[in-house]
Image (cartoon, rainbow, N blue to C red):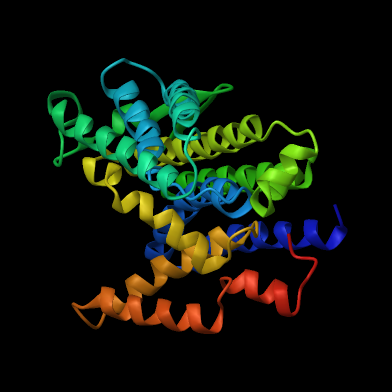
Amino acid sequence: MSVRIILLHAGVILALFLMQFLASDYVVLTFTRIMVLAIYALGYNILFGYTGLLSLGHAMFFATGLYGAALGVTRFGLGVPEAMLVAIGLGIIVSTVIGAVSLRASGVAFMIVTLMFSQAAFLTVLYFGDYTRGDEGIVISDEFRRFSLFGLEADLANPVLRYNLALAFLALAVAVTLAVIRSRAGHVLVAIRENESRTAMLGYDTARYKLLAFVLSGAFAAFSGASYALMFAYAGSTLASIQYSIHPLLWTLLGGAATVLGPVLGTALMFLLVDFASGFTSASLLVVGVALILLVLFFPKGILGTLRQRYLPWLP
């Protein structure tokens, strides 16, 4: 891995770290949310951007982590670290099972199968409302968000801790993504995206590699969902709806699919654009829609994807 790639990604993490000392409390809270959800988009990008598989069911994995962590601390007496691990483990199990079934289909059929599974998961959340509390959601009280780790006491209600923990999680997600795409497996995933038949002819087990990408993507989504529930003290059925399967797709396309930092940039821009538009009009989604159309026209491969194509060919 070249030095400039390392410096670029380290510089982004450093800039986010310094932001907390310069920005207002509201901006810090907003970027905490952005960083947590950017992990979701990073995982989605591994499946969509690098492997070429368009899923419409990722809200199911996000919700697995979300409710796994929320129910873990509120109903099963788990501490925050244990709830996080359990939620990620559940995300890996669910994505393995769903991936093994969904990947039997391809193209549009794959999209429809993942959408059907996601809708089934959403209806399950509503059906078991006695536990999930449906649309009302689970509000996690502060007592469940306090924990000790390596002898240190921590409280996720503390905005400073929450921001830096979200930053650490994002840095970990970026590092894992870089390691995956620069590895032999990552090169095979890109080859599958470009020409699956030819990749299979070269002797690679494409089904196994696609399942690997699916499970890794699901684990990222569950990690993000668990972090969201514990950091923002809430888990609701809205976060399991089809809307949260569309969001990571939009974030990835906006920032640039198959670029490591593209999903992070796309998540930030979408959040800031909605926030800005909401400040002066009730039709904020209209403003967002117009902005997205303009971005697609002038940046057809997303912002970083287009920049890489035109000026920065070394960008991962």
Q: Determine the residue positioned at 62% across, 60% down.
A: 261
Question: Is residue 271 shown left or right of residue 170?
Answer: left
Question: Is residue 83 shown left or right of residue 117?
Answer: right
Q: Tell me residue 124's x, y (percent).
A: 21, 29
Q: Determine the residue positioned at 27% across, 73% down.
A: 285
Q: Tell me residue 35's x, y (percent).
A: 50, 53
* Picture quarter with the C terminus: bottom right
Residue 157 visible here: no
Count of numbered tags: 0
Residue 292 visible here: yes
Residue 6 to residue 104: above or below: below
Residue in the foreground of this view, choosing between 104 and 29: 104
Q: Residue 273 sits in which quadrant?
A: bottom left
Question: Is residue 68 shown left or right of residue 82?
Answer: left
Residue 144 to residue 245: above or below: above
Residue in the foreground of this view, choosing between 158 and 121: 121
Residue 258 to residue 307: above or below: above
Q: Tell me residue 136's x, y (percent).
A: 14, 40
Residue in the foreground of this view, choosing between 181 and 154: 181
Question: Is residue 167 shown left or right of residue 292?
Answer: right
Q: Residue 168 sits in which quadrant?
A: top right
The residue most toward the top is: 76
Q: Determine the residue positioned at 41% across, 43% down.
A: 58
Residue 253 to residue 135: above or below: below
Q: Determine the residue positioned at 61% across, 44% down.
A: 173
Q: Tell me residue 51's x, y (percent).
A: 62, 47
